[in-house]
Image (cartoon, rainbow, N blue to C red):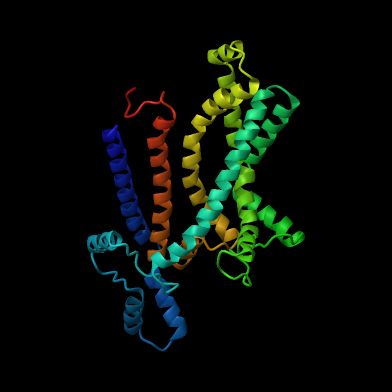
Amino acid sequence: MVRYYLERLTQSIITLLAVVTLSFGMIRLMPGGPMEMMRARLIRQNPDLGMDRINRLAENYVGFQPDRPIHEQYIEYLTMLAQGDMGDSYEFGRPVVDILAEALPWTAFVMSLSLLLMFVIAIALGALMAYREGSRFDTSWTVTSVTLTSVPYYVAAILLVYVFGYQLGWLPTGGRVAHTAEAGLNGEFLVSAIRHAVLPVASFVITGFGALAVAMRGNSIQVLGEDYMRVARLRGLSERRISFRYVARNAILPMWTSFLIAIGAMFGGSVILEEIFSYPGVGYYMLQAIEMRDMPLMMGAFLVITIGIIIGVLVADLTYGMLDPRASRGGGAQ
Protein backbone atom coordinates (compact mmCIF):
# COMPACT_ATOMS: atom_id res chain seq x y z
CA MET A 1 0.00 0.00 0.00
CA VAL A 2 2.81 2.43 0.90
CA ARG A 3 4.50 1.70 -2.41
CA TYR A 4 1.28 2.46 -4.27
CA TYR A 5 0.88 5.78 -2.47
CA LEU A 6 4.48 6.73 -3.26
CA GLU A 7 3.98 5.84 -6.93
CA ARG A 8 0.86 7.99 -7.19
CA LEU A 9 2.57 10.88 -5.39
CA THR A 10 5.56 10.61 -7.74
CA GLN A 11 3.27 10.61 -10.78
CA SER A 12 1.55 13.76 -9.49
CA ILE A 13 4.88 15.55 -8.99
CA ILE A 14 6.01 14.56 -12.51
CA THR A 15 2.68 15.78 -13.90
CA LEU A 16 3.07 19.12 -12.11
CA LEU A 17 6.62 19.54 -13.40
CA ALA A 18 5.48 18.72 -16.95
CA VAL A 19 2.67 21.29 -16.72
CA VAL A 20 5.06 23.96 -15.39
CA THR A 21 7.50 23.23 -18.24
CA LEU A 22 4.81 23.33 -20.94
CA SER A 23 3.20 26.49 -19.60
CA PHE A 24 6.61 28.18 -19.31
CA GLY A 25 7.39 27.49 -22.96
CA MET A 26 3.91 28.12 -24.39
CA ILE A 27 3.41 31.44 -22.59
CA ARG A 28 6.70 32.71 -23.97
CA LEU A 29 5.63 31.73 -27.47
CA MET A 30 2.48 33.84 -27.24
CA PRO A 31 2.45 36.80 -29.64
CA GLY A 32 2.62 40.24 -28.07
CA GLY A 33 4.56 39.55 -24.87
CA PRO A 34 5.06 41.93 -21.92
CA MET A 35 7.96 43.69 -23.63
CA GLU A 36 5.74 44.69 -26.56
CA MET A 37 3.00 45.84 -24.21
CA MET A 38 5.43 47.96 -22.18
CA ARG A 39 7.09 49.41 -25.30
CA ALA A 40 3.69 50.48 -26.65
CA ARG A 41 2.79 52.09 -23.31
CA LEU A 42 6.10 53.96 -23.08
CA ILE A 43 5.80 55.17 -26.67
CA ARG A 44 2.32 56.57 -25.94
CA GLN A 45 3.52 58.25 -22.75
CA ASN A 46 6.88 59.47 -24.10
CA PRO A 47 6.68 59.89 -27.88
CA ASP A 48 9.97 61.86 -27.98
CA LEU A 49 12.15 59.07 -26.53
CA GLY A 50 14.31 57.01 -28.85
CA MET A 51 13.76 53.27 -29.29
CA ASP A 52 17.01 52.36 -27.51
CA ARG A 53 15.93 54.29 -24.43
CA ILE A 54 12.44 52.80 -24.60
CA ASN A 55 13.86 49.26 -24.86
CA ARG A 56 16.09 49.79 -21.81
CA LEU A 57 13.23 51.25 -19.77
CA ALA A 58 10.94 48.35 -20.79
CA GLU A 59 13.55 45.78 -19.77
CA ASN A 60 14.12 47.48 -16.42
CA TYR A 61 10.40 47.73 -15.68
CA VAL A 62 9.49 44.21 -16.78
CA GLY A 63 12.67 42.59 -15.48
CA PHE A 64 12.71 40.37 -18.56
CA GLN A 65 15.59 40.13 -20.98
CA PRO A 66 14.47 38.53 -24.25
CA ASP A 67 18.04 37.89 -25.37
CA ARG A 68 18.77 35.49 -22.49
CA PRO A 69 18.75 31.76 -23.41
CA ILE A 70 15.43 30.08 -22.65
CA HIS A 71 17.05 27.38 -20.52
CA GLU A 72 18.58 29.99 -18.21
CA GLN A 73 15.18 31.63 -17.76
CA TYR A 74 13.62 28.22 -17.07
CA ILE A 75 16.20 27.25 -14.42
CA GLU A 76 15.82 30.65 -12.78
CA TYR A 77 12.04 30.27 -12.70
CA LEU A 78 12.21 26.79 -11.12
CA THR A 79 14.66 28.10 -8.52
CA MET A 80 12.28 30.92 -7.66
CA LEU A 81 9.34 28.49 -7.39
CA ALA A 82 11.33 26.25 -5.04
CA GLN A 83 11.78 29.29 -2.80
CA GLY A 84 8.08 30.16 -2.91
CA ASP A 85 8.65 33.14 -5.18
CA MET A 86 6.50 33.52 -8.31
CA GLY A 87 7.91 36.90 -9.24
CA ASP A 88 6.19 40.28 -9.34
CA SER A 89 3.16 41.18 -11.42
CA TYR A 90 3.95 43.61 -14.22
CA GLU A 91 0.47 45.11 -14.18
CA PHE A 92 -0.29 45.30 -10.44
CA GLY A 93 3.25 45.92 -9.20
CA ARG A 94 2.89 43.40 -6.38
CA PRO A 95 4.32 39.92 -5.69
CA VAL A 96 2.26 37.26 -7.46
CA VAL A 97 2.18 35.17 -4.27
CA ASP A 98 0.47 38.01 -2.39
CA ILE A 99 -2.11 38.56 -5.15
CA LEU A 100 -3.02 34.87 -5.38
CA ALA A 101 -2.99 34.39 -1.59
CA GLU A 102 -5.59 37.15 -1.36
CA ALA A 103 -7.67 35.78 -4.24
CA LEU A 104 -7.55 32.03 -3.51
CA PRO A 105 -9.80 32.03 -0.39
CA TRP A 106 -12.56 33.77 -2.35
CA THR A 107 -12.35 31.28 -5.22
CA ALA A 108 -12.30 28.42 -2.71
CA PHE A 109 -15.34 29.94 -0.97
CA VAL A 110 -17.42 29.98 -4.16
CA MET A 111 -16.16 26.57 -5.33
CA SER A 112 -16.79 24.83 -1.99
CA LEU A 113 -20.32 26.23 -1.68
CA SER A 114 -21.07 25.24 -5.28
CA LEU A 115 -19.73 21.70 -4.87
CA LEU A 116 -21.54 21.13 -1.58
CA LEU A 117 -24.92 22.32 -2.86
CA MET A 118 -24.48 20.59 -6.21
CA PHE A 119 -23.78 17.17 -4.71
CA VAL A 120 -26.38 17.42 -1.93
CA ILE A 121 -29.09 18.27 -4.48
CA ALA A 122 -27.85 15.64 -6.95
CA ILE A 123 -27.69 12.81 -4.40
CA ALA A 124 -31.10 13.55 -2.90
CA LEU A 125 -32.79 14.06 -6.28
CA GLY A 126 -31.10 11.06 -7.90
CA ALA A 127 -32.15 8.76 -5.05
CA LEU A 128 -35.78 9.94 -5.29
CA MET A 129 -35.76 9.45 -9.06
CA ALA A 130 -34.47 5.88 -8.61
CA TYR A 131 -37.13 4.99 -6.02
CA ARG A 132 -39.83 6.37 -8.33
CA GLU A 133 -38.39 4.88 -11.49
CA GLY A 134 -40.78 5.19 -14.44
CA SER A 135 -43.07 7.68 -12.70
CA ARG A 136 -43.92 11.15 -13.94
CA PHE A 137 -41.59 12.58 -11.28
CA ASP A 138 -38.70 10.48 -12.60
CA THR A 139 -39.37 11.33 -16.25
CA SER A 140 -39.81 15.07 -15.73
CA TRP A 141 -36.71 15.46 -13.58
CA THR A 142 -34.61 13.33 -15.92
CA VAL A 143 -35.56 15.59 -18.83
CA THR A 144 -34.96 18.71 -16.70
CA SER A 145 -31.58 17.44 -15.53
CA VAL A 146 -30.38 16.65 -19.04
CA THR A 147 -31.63 20.01 -20.31
CA LEU A 148 -29.90 22.02 -17.59
CA THR A 149 -26.68 20.06 -18.07
CA SER A 150 -26.60 21.05 -21.73
CA VAL A 151 -26.64 24.77 -20.81
CA PRO A 152 -23.11 26.22 -20.43
CA TYR A 153 -22.51 27.69 -17.00
CA TYR A 154 -21.45 31.05 -18.44
CA VAL A 155 -24.76 31.34 -20.34
CA ALA A 156 -26.63 30.69 -17.09
CA ALA A 157 -24.40 33.28 -15.39
CA ILE A 158 -25.27 35.97 -17.95
CA LEU A 159 -28.99 35.20 -17.64
CA LEU A 160 -28.85 35.31 -13.84
CA VAL A 161 -27.01 38.62 -13.87
CA TYR A 162 -29.55 40.11 -16.28
CA VAL A 163 -32.63 38.89 -14.37
CA PHE A 164 -31.65 39.07 -10.70
CA GLY A 165 -29.01 41.77 -10.97
CA TYR A 166 -30.19 44.32 -13.51
CA GLN A 167 -33.91 43.67 -13.95
CA LEU A 168 -34.98 42.83 -10.39
CA GLY A 169 -32.02 44.35 -8.54
CA TRP A 170 -32.16 41.70 -5.83
CA LEU A 171 -28.48 40.72 -5.85
CA PRO A 172 -25.16 42.46 -6.58
CA THR A 173 -23.62 41.86 -10.01
CA GLY A 174 -19.94 42.25 -9.15
CA GLY A 175 -17.30 42.35 -6.45
CA ARG A 176 -16.61 40.12 -3.47
CA VAL A 177 -18.21 42.24 -0.75
CA ALA A 178 -19.86 45.63 -0.51
CA HIS A 179 -17.49 48.57 -0.18
CA THR A 180 -19.23 49.64 3.01
CA ALA A 181 -18.78 46.26 4.73
CA GLU A 182 -16.01 46.25 7.32
CA ALA A 183 -13.65 43.29 6.83
CA GLY A 184 -13.67 40.73 9.62
CA LEU A 185 -15.82 38.04 11.19
CA ASN A 186 -18.88 40.20 11.63
CA GLY A 187 -22.45 39.75 10.46
CA GLU A 188 -22.46 42.55 7.89
CA PHE A 189 -19.30 41.27 6.19
CA LEU A 190 -20.47 37.63 6.08
CA VAL A 191 -23.92 38.53 4.76
CA SER A 192 -22.37 40.74 2.09
CA ALA A 193 -19.91 37.99 1.05
CA ILE A 194 -22.74 35.46 0.75
CA ARG A 195 -24.95 37.85 -1.26
CA HIS A 196 -22.11 38.51 -3.71
CA ALA A 197 -21.47 34.77 -4.06
CA VAL A 198 -25.10 33.76 -4.67
CA LEU A 199 -25.14 34.31 -8.43
CA PRO A 200 -21.75 32.65 -9.16
CA VAL A 201 -22.71 29.68 -7.00
CA ALA A 202 -26.14 29.42 -8.63
CA SER A 203 -24.55 29.41 -12.09
CA PHE A 204 -22.46 26.36 -11.23
CA VAL A 205 -25.18 24.53 -9.29
CA ILE A 206 -28.01 25.00 -11.80
CA THR A 207 -25.93 23.72 -14.71
CA GLY A 208 -23.98 21.07 -12.80
CA PHE A 209 -26.34 19.09 -10.58
CA GLY A 210 -28.26 17.48 -13.46
CA ALA A 211 -25.54 15.14 -14.74
CA LEU A 212 -24.70 14.09 -11.18
CA ALA A 213 -28.37 13.45 -10.36
CA VAL A 214 -28.75 11.21 -13.41
CA ALA A 215 -25.57 9.36 -12.41
CA MET A 216 -26.88 8.93 -8.85
CA ARG A 217 -30.17 7.66 -10.26
CA GLY A 218 -28.37 5.03 -12.32
CA ASN A 219 -26.21 3.94 -9.37
CA SER A 220 -29.24 3.65 -7.10
CA ILE A 221 -31.24 1.63 -9.63
CA GLN A 222 -28.29 -0.74 -10.02
CA VAL A 223 -28.00 -1.19 -6.25
CA LEU A 224 -31.76 -1.75 -5.87
CA GLY A 225 -31.49 -4.66 -8.30
CA GLU A 226 -28.71 -6.47 -6.42
CA ASP A 227 -29.35 -9.79 -4.70
CA TYR A 228 -28.32 -8.53 -1.26
CA MET A 229 -31.19 -6.04 -1.41
CA ARG A 230 -33.68 -8.91 -1.67
CA VAL A 231 -31.92 -10.65 1.22
CA ALA A 232 -32.16 -7.51 3.32
CA ARG A 233 -35.91 -7.25 2.71
CA LEU A 234 -36.38 -10.97 3.48
CA ARG A 235 -34.59 -10.42 6.78
CA GLY A 236 -37.34 -7.93 7.66
CA LEU A 237 -35.17 -4.82 7.73
CA SER A 238 -37.05 -1.54 7.57
CA GLU A 239 -37.13 0.33 4.27
CA ARG A 240 -35.53 3.32 5.97
CA ARG A 241 -32.57 1.25 7.14
CA ILE A 242 -32.22 -0.36 3.71
CA SER A 243 -32.28 3.05 2.03
CA PHE A 244 -29.53 4.58 4.14
CA ARG A 245 -27.35 1.59 5.00
CA TYR A 246 -27.40 -0.30 1.71
CA VAL A 247 -28.66 1.86 -1.14
CA ALA A 248 -27.24 5.27 -0.20
CA ARG A 249 -23.82 4.01 0.87
CA ASN A 250 -23.20 1.89 -2.23
CA ALA A 251 -24.72 4.37 -4.68
CA ILE A 252 -22.74 7.33 -3.34
CA LEU A 253 -19.35 5.58 -3.44
CA PRO A 254 -18.88 5.93 -7.23
CA MET A 255 -19.74 9.64 -6.87
CA TRP A 256 -16.72 10.27 -4.65
CA THR A 257 -14.28 10.35 -7.56
CA SER A 258 -16.56 12.67 -9.52
CA PHE A 259 -16.80 14.96 -6.49
CA LEU A 260 -13.04 15.45 -6.20
CA ILE A 261 -12.38 15.65 -9.94
CA ALA A 262 -15.10 18.32 -10.16
CA ILE A 263 -12.87 20.55 -8.04
CA GLY A 264 -10.45 20.85 -10.93
CA ALA A 265 -13.20 21.42 -13.47
CA MET A 266 -14.68 24.21 -11.38
CA PHE A 267 -11.30 25.85 -10.87
CA GLY A 268 -10.96 25.95 -14.65
CA GLY A 269 -14.49 27.28 -15.02
CA SER A 270 -13.79 30.06 -12.54
CA VAL A 271 -11.71 31.88 -15.17
CA ILE A 272 -14.78 32.89 -17.20
CA LEU A 273 -17.28 32.96 -14.34
CA GLU A 274 -15.28 35.34 -12.16
CA GLU A 275 -14.78 37.66 -15.13
CA ILE A 276 -18.56 37.77 -15.77
CA PHE A 277 -19.25 38.70 -12.14
CA SER A 278 -16.09 40.84 -11.71
CA TYR A 279 -15.30 38.57 -8.77
CA PRO A 280 -11.57 38.98 -8.00
CA GLY A 281 -10.52 35.38 -7.53
CA VAL A 282 -7.77 33.27 -9.08
CA GLY A 283 -9.63 32.90 -12.38
CA TYR A 284 -10.30 36.64 -12.59
CA TYR A 285 -6.62 37.50 -12.15
CA MET A 286 -5.60 34.83 -14.64
CA LEU A 287 -7.78 36.36 -17.35
CA GLN A 288 -6.50 39.84 -16.48
CA ALA A 289 -2.95 38.53 -16.78
CA ILE A 290 -3.68 37.01 -20.21
CA GLU A 291 -5.10 40.30 -21.48
CA MET A 292 -2.15 42.30 -20.15
CA ARG A 293 0.49 39.69 -21.08
CA ASP A 294 1.50 39.64 -17.41
CA MET A 295 3.61 36.45 -17.54
CA PRO A 296 4.43 36.01 -13.82
CA LEU A 297 0.78 36.43 -12.78
CA MET A 298 -0.42 34.29 -15.68
CA MET A 299 1.91 31.41 -14.79
CA GLY A 300 1.19 31.74 -11.07
CA ALA A 301 -2.59 31.57 -11.54
CA PHE A 302 -2.25 28.67 -13.97
CA LEU A 303 0.00 26.86 -11.49
CA VAL A 304 -2.51 27.28 -8.65
CA ILE A 305 -5.34 25.92 -10.82
CA THR A 306 -3.15 22.99 -11.93
CA ILE A 307 -2.24 22.15 -8.33
CA GLY A 308 -5.95 22.15 -7.42
CA ILE A 309 -6.72 19.69 -10.22
CA ILE A 310 -3.79 17.40 -9.36
CA ILE A 311 -4.65 17.36 -5.65
CA GLY A 312 -8.30 16.53 -6.40
CA VAL A 313 -7.37 13.61 -8.67
CA LEU A 314 -4.68 12.39 -6.24
CA VAL A 315 -6.97 12.44 -3.20
CA ALA A 316 -9.71 10.67 -5.18
CA ASP A 317 -7.28 7.97 -6.25
CA LEU A 318 -5.78 7.44 -2.80
CA THR A 319 -9.00 7.48 -0.79
CA TYR A 320 -11.36 5.52 -3.01
CA GLY A 321 -9.78 2.21 -2.05
CA MET A 322 -10.28 3.07 1.63
CA LEU A 323 -13.94 3.90 1.11
CA ASP A 324 -14.67 0.89 -1.10
CA PRO A 325 -12.73 -2.29 -0.17
CA ARG A 326 -13.81 -3.86 -3.47
CA ALA A 327 -11.62 -1.42 -5.39
CA SER A 328 -8.13 -2.57 -6.30
CA ARG A 329 -4.95 -0.64 -5.67
CA GLY A 330 -2.07 -0.55 -8.04
CA GLY A 331 -3.87 -2.70 -10.57
CA GLY A 332 -4.24 -5.75 -8.35
CA ALA A 333 -6.96 -6.83 -5.95
CA GLN A 334 -6.13 -6.90 -2.29
| Residue 313, position as x, y percentages in the image | 41, 41
Q: Residue at x 32, y 78 (%)?
A: 60
Instruction: Identify the image quadrant of residue 81.
Output: bottom left
Furthest residue to the right?
Answer: 168
User: Seen in the image, is 135 located left or right of residue 5?
Assistant: right
Question: At 38% across and 69% down in the image, what residue appears?
Answer: 95
Left or right for 168, reference 195: right
> Is 215 placed above or below 11 here?
above
- Residue at horizontal 51 percent and vertical 60 percent from the top: 281
Is residue 79 something that shows in the picture?
A: yes
Relative image position of residue 330 (x, y in whole percent): 32, 29
Q: Is residue 45 left or right of residue 50?
A: right
Q: Quadrant of residue 8?
A: top left
Q: Position of residue 267 (x, y in %)?
A: 49, 51
Query: In this rendering, does residue 282 appear at all?
Result: no
Image quarter of the C terminus = top left
User: In terms of depth relative to the viewer, which is nearer, 67 or 153?
Assistant: 153
Query: Is 188 rendered above or below residue 229?
Result: below
Q: Quadrant of residue 36?
A: bottom left
On the rendered structure, is 247 left or right of 10? Answer: right
Where residue 155 sits: x, y (%)? Answer: 64, 50
**Dividing the image into 4 quarters, which one contains the N terminus?**
top left
Q: How many callouts does the rendering have?
A: 0
